[in-house]
Image: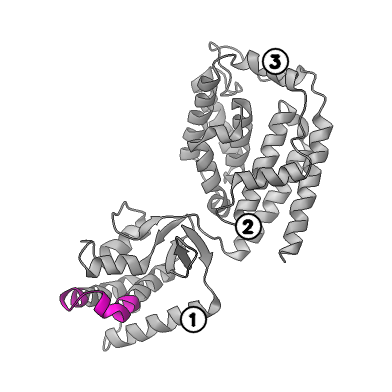
């Protein structure tokens, strides 16, 4: 599904259609609250069910759909967007976490009695995030409002600069580069929902990446961490961070921007590469979303202790429970730290240039 903002012209037409419908249907009724209006619209739905098919009442069905959608928008967190398979205009309401209601499809299903759910039940369920089996209710990658996009972009660029400046907090150059590349992907995905990781990697390559070298040193380090048990290591990382993600107290704006990519990585962890790279990426991205970073670090320590026997032991270490090996990797002789730092600098400059060309500065 493609999600795109509606033009000012389309938004005005939606508002006018909903206002005309409500003035016609609510004659003599003094209701202003969204739920009360939806209750009144339920009676209109019943009338349409009893009088002809949906195609013969296309205008009324459309008016009812837009009037219903307008009440969700009034309730907060929902906005009008266009949601379609082919990129055409299909006015729908989308919540900031990606839940969507294609109102024309949904109301048509109700009128034709393919759905037994009523408007009031649907309205309450959508507000409460209840599981509702109704045609036209689905999850999409939402298009974020421009002010939110700008704030999250600034935060992501700042975090990229911090990642570059604190290079030695990572265990190896490949981890540093992986974290930076995934933050760059999160930024590009925020600008353009549906942006593919392959496109981010192509941009990374145009900037000269991959920047990390030392293949033998990296391979020897990993052989000591998990040896031939690579899938066990990857599974431990995925399960550990999935638990943390489920418990996380999230900063709402960053959650809206970052959730699609974090959850895609949890579903397809090989996208991040080796288990230690996956560990570094998920640690960083989820930490970026945390409302209270210190509480996140504390919970991370509890989860590490549960899985590995020590609060500092990374999830990807495959060995009997014992003291943390976290510090051992810092003694390795990696030579490409500076190459990665300079490469990330070039990527940040490119992202900033693209931001200026896009008119965001």
Residue at the image point whose x is 61% and y is 13% from the top? 323
**Where is residue 41 shown, x and y percent of the image?**
27, 75
Residue 173 image position (x, y, % from top left) = 74, 29
Q: Label 3 to label 2, Cα distance in Å?
A: 39 Å
Q: Quick check: 80 left or right of 279?
A: left
Reply yes or no: does residue 62 show up in magenta: yes
- Name the outermost residue toward the front: 86
Kindly report the distance in space between the C-alpha atoms of the residues bearing marks 1 and 2: 25 Å
Give the mark, 1 or 2, whose residue is nearer the N terminus: 1
Quadrant of residue 343 in the image?
top right
Q: Quadrant of residue 114?
A: bottom left
Question: Pointer 2: residues within 10 angstroms few (<14), some, or many (20+)?
Answer: many
Q: Secondary structure at mark 3?
A: helix
Residue 45 horizontal/vertical position (percent):
23, 74
User: Eyeballing the image, is 66 above or below 316?
Assistant: below
Helix or strand or loop: what does disc 1 sit on? helix
Q: Is residue 204 placed above or below 50 in the rendered structure?
A: above
CA separation in Å, label 3 and label 1: 62 Å
Q: Which residue is mark 2?
A: 191
- Look at the image and tell me whether residue 81 can be seen: yes
Q: Please give the residue where the numbered disc 1 appears in the rendered image.
A: 12
Q: Is residue 101 left or right of residue 144?
A: left
Residue depth check, mark 3 versus mark 1: number of the one nearer the observer: 3
What secondary structure is the stretch in magenta mostly built from?
A: helix
| Residue interval drawn in magenta | 46-64
Q: Check residue 185 for magenta coloring.
A: no
Q: Position of residue 144 (x, y in %)?
A: 56, 60
Say whether marks 1 and 2 touch (CB < 8 Å): no
At a point 57% along the width and 64% down the height, the residue shown is 145
In the rendered image, which residue does mark 3 sit on? 220
């Amino acid at each position: 599904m493609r999600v795109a903002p509606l033009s000012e012209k389309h938004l005005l037409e939606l508002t006018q259609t909903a206002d005309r419908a409500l003035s016609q249907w609510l004659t003599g009724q003094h209701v202003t609250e969204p739920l009360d209006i939806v209750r009144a619209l339920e009676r209109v739905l019943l009338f349409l069910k009893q009088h002809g098919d949906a195609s013969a009442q296309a205008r009324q069905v459309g008016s009812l759909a837009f009037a219903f959608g307008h009440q969700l928008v009034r309730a907060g967190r929902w906005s009008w967007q266009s949601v379609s398979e082919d990129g055409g205009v299909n006015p729908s309401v989308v919540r900031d976490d990606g839940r969507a209601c294609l109102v024309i499809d949904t109301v048509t299903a109700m009128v034709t009695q393919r759905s037994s759910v009523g408007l009031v039940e649907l309205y309450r369920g959508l507000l409460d995030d209840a599981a509702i089996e109704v045609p036209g209710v689905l999850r999409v990658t939402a298009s974020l409002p421009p002010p939110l996009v700008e704030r999250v972009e600034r935060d992501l660029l700042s975090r990229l600069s911090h990642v570059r400046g604190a290079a030695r907090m990572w265990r190896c150059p490949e981890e540093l580069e992986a974290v930076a590349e995934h933050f760059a992907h999160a930024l590009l995905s925020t600008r353009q929902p549906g942006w593919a990781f392959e496109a981010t990697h192509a941009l990374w390559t145009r900037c000269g990446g991959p920047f990390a070298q030392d293949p033998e040193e990296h391979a020897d380090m990993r052989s000591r961490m998990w040896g031939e048990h690579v899938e066990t290591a990857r599974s431990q990382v995925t399960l550990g961070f999935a638990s943390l993600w489920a418990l996380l107290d999230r900063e709402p704006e960053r959650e809206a921007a970052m959730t699609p990519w974090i959850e895609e990585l949890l579903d397809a962890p090989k996208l991040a590469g080796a288990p230690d790279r996956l560990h570094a990426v998920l640690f960083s991205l989820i930490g970026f979303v945390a409302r209270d970073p210190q509480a996140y670090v504390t919970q991370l320590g509890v989860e590490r202790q549960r899985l590995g026997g020590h609060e500092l032991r990374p999830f990807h270490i495959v060995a009997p429970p014992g003291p943390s090996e976290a510090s051992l990797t810092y003694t390795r002789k990696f030579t490409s730290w500076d190459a990665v730092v300079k490469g990330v600098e070039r990527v940040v400059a490119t992202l900033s240039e693209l931001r200026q060309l896009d008119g965001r500065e």
